[in-house]
Image (cartoon, grey):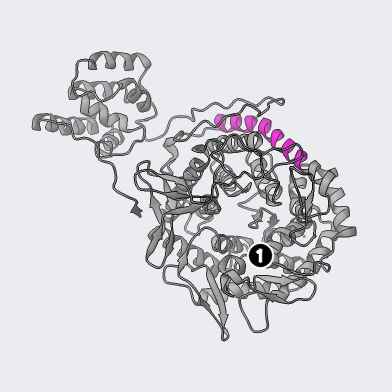
């Protein structure tokens, strides 16, 4: 892992050889007198330059007469904490010390988080339910750098059964506000744009930029079902059954977007409701989308005309396709094959992975531009990223393996190889705060930026760790889980450090300044990737902090993105005095609100470990072993 810039150095204090010797003697005594855990902990922190809560121990040992410090630490070794009175007395003792560089009470309060018995203190943050009448009109962002104990991806607090119960009770009260937001946005869409692709949230108009195939309606179906909005769901089903058509568009559409939004939306609605209308329309759409594969070629074209079947790639990619476009069709088409007993959908899209696996780079990381060439596949650039153009390809490496019941080893091997390459080449740490992030790499040159899109990786790494064939307690799984948590904290900071509490499209990391809004990217498109990771980590770890962070994001969206009928994008997340744009992507209802709801729903039927796999548009479908058992 490469660190950006030069790490800060703490000022060197003068110490006599005698005092240094006393410190080592005291450490040895501590090892014997208060247990191995305390001694190792203190020795590690004497060498640690981090700004974690444990740094209080180091400062205490440096600035307090050693014997007195050791006496105090030993007296509290079995207590978990130092009291406020202790802090006051220690401050009084230190007033005449010339080398005092701060208020000891702050150090002591930080020191309270330390447990000497090898565990962690109980989760300390409030878990109070939210009032049903709560509003967000006066909500203000709380600022960044909070919850710093989560920065490095550790497990700072003990999550007891009682804490989980309190968190669940709090979540249920929050869940209703997210459901209310979905109902509000759906009602606006239904009134002003029902059956069209998108509603215009400010002008009350509509767009059909996806071809007029009811994209928001279809993309929202399973969100309505999961939230229990069944009247709205069945009304939408009637439109799908009676009016949805894919043969009138007259121009090419994105193979990728139409697959993940429309095909995925129809299949998930079928999986949850078992209504055949959804499967009929999905099969029709799936047949049309398969025309993106030209005879004899492994890589599909990025655009296809659903009426004529003509296909091609966008000009700005120079006639190439992206790895994300080609590598994010499999979950949907494999499911379609499973429930129709027609293997062609799976066979065509699985061959993409087989062809790419044959040219897999040694580090497992794939450049984002690929092309069919003389019967084979080749890369047409050297750009590595976990952001736009590549992101969901890595996601499907893991999720296709999960969908098939963990039996198709090629997909998991590709995933594990890629994650090793990510750790070796792209994972970075910022200065001065030590935030983990994933850089881009073009050839041998790193670009220290991270897309909001890349923030899905926190959740994916956690899911990969919990399903690791070596076991969740294995070295590899624990490394991946720690990295996933650390990345998710950074993504939370992308929101928390902005004036609106909302993240920009991407950020640029700067030496000794952590990060700033990326050039030309101050906007927010109502994206879901950060709250996706919050949901997965909350589901797997039960740590209430992810619900807390998600509630901040939801509150910020309510405060700054809400219009009189729906929600709109933001042009500048640093500006608290702006009106939303006149655009709401379908994925806001399909993904962002769904993940925010599931995050606060302890009673959900969704089971990401044993029953469901989400496509990259947040459409959950049952995995194949469950289908075999239940159907």
Q: Image height check: is 487 above or below 603?
A: below
Q: Is residue 355 visible in this depiction of the protein?
A: yes
In the rendered image, residue 105, in percent from the top left (x then y), is placed at 33, 20
In the rendered image, residue 125, in percent from the top left (x then y), is placed at 51, 28
Mark 1 secondary-structure assignment: helix
Q: Image height check: is 274 above or below 204?
A: below
In the rendered image, residue 358, in percent from the top left (x then y), is placed at 51, 77
- What residue lies at 47% left-to-right and 48% top-to-bottom? 487
Which quadrant holds residue 226? top right
Q: Nearer the viewer, residue 377 or 416?
A: 377
Which quadrant holds residue 282? bottom right
- What residue lies at 71% left-to-right and 72% top-to-bottom? 304
Q: Which residues are magenta?
A: 162-185
Q: Which quadrant of the figure contains the C terminus? A: bottom right
In the rendered image, residue 97, in percent from the top left (x then y), is placed at 19, 19
Q: Nearer the viewer, residue 253 or 62?
A: 253
Residue 592 within the segment the image draws in magenta: no
Magenta segment main secondary structure: helix
Mark 1 lies on residue: 256
Label 1 neighbour load within 10 Å: few <14, some 14-19, many 20+: many
């Amino acid at each position: 892992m490469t660190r950006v810039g030069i790490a800060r150095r703490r000022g060197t204090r003068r110490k006599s050889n005698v005092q240094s010797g006393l410190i080592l003697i005291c450490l040895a005594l501590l090892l014997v007198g208060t247990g191995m855990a305390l001694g190792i902990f203190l020795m590690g922190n004497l060498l640690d330059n981090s700004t974690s809560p444990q740094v209080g121990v180091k400062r205490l040992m440096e600035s307090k007469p050693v014997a007195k410090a050791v006496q105090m630490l030993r007296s509290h070794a079995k207590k978990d904490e130092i009291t406020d009175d202790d802090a006051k007395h220690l401050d009084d003792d230190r007033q005449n010390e010339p080398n005092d560089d701060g208020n000891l009470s702050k150090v002591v309060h930080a020191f309270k988080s330390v447990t000497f018995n090898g565990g962690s203190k109980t989760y300390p943050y409030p878990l109070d339910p939210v009032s049903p009448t709560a509003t967000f009109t006066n909500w203000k962002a709380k600022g960044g750098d909070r919850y710093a104990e989560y920065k490095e991806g550790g497990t700072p607090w003990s999550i007891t059964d009682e804490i989980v119960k309190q968190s669940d009770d709090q979540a249920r009260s929050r869940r209703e506000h997210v459901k209310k937001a979905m109902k509000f946005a759906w009602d606006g869409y239904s009134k002003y744009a029902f059956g069209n692709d998108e509603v215009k949230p400010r002008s009350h108009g509509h767009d059909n930029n996806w071809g007029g195939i009811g994209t928001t309606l279809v993309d929202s179906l399973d969100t309505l079902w999961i939230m229990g909005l069944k009247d709205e769901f069945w009304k939408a089903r009637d439109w799908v059954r009676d009016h949805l058509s894919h043969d009138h568009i007259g121009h090419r559409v994105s193979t990728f977007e139409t697959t993940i939004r429309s095909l995925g939306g129809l299949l998930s609605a079928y999986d949850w409701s078992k209504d055949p209308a959804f499967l009929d329309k999905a099969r029709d759409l799936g047949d049309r989308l398969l025309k993106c594969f030209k005879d004899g070629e492994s890589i599909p074209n990025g655009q296809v005309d659903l009426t004529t079947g003509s296909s091609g790639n966008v000009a700005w990619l120079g006639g190439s396709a992206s790895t994300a476009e080609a590598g994010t069709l499999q979950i949907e088409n494999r499911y379609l094959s499973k429930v129709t007993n027609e293997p062609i959908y799976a066979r065509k899209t699985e061959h993409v992975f087989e062809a790419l696996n044959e040219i897999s780079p040694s580090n497992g990381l794939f450049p984002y531009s690929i092309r069919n060439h003389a019967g084979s596949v080749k890369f047409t650039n050297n750009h590595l990223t976990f952001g736009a153009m590549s992101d969901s390809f890595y996601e499907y490496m893991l999720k296709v393996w999960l969908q098939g019941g963990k039996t198709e080893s090629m997909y998991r091997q590709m995933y594990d190889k890629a994650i090793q390459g990510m750790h070796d080449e792209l994972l970075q740490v910022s200065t001065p705060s030590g935030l983990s992030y994933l850089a881009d790499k073009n050839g041998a040159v790193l670009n220290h930026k991270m897309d909001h899109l890349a923030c899905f990786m926190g959740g994916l790494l956690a899911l990969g760790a919990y399903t690791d064939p070596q076991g969740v307690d294995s070295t590899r799984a624990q490394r991946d889980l720690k990295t996933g948590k650390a990345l998710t904290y950074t993504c939370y900071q992308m929101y928390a450090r902005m004036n609106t509490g909302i993240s920009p499209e991407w950020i640029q990391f700067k030496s000794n300044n952590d990060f700033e809004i990326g050039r030309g990217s101050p906007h927010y498109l109502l994206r879901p990737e950060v709250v996706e990771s919050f949901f997965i980590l909350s589901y797997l770890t039960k740590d209430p902090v992810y619900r807390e962070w998600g509630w901040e994001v939801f509150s910020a969206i309510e405060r700054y993105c809400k219009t009189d009928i729906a929600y709109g994008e933001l042009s500048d997340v640093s500006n608290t005095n702006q009106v939303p744009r006149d655009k709401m992507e379908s994925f806001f209802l399909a993904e962002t609100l769904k993940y925010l709801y599931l995050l606060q729903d302890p009673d959900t039927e969704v089971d990401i470990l044993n029953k469901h796999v989400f496509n990259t548009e947040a459409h959950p479908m049952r995995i194949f072993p469950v289908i075999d058992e239940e159907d």
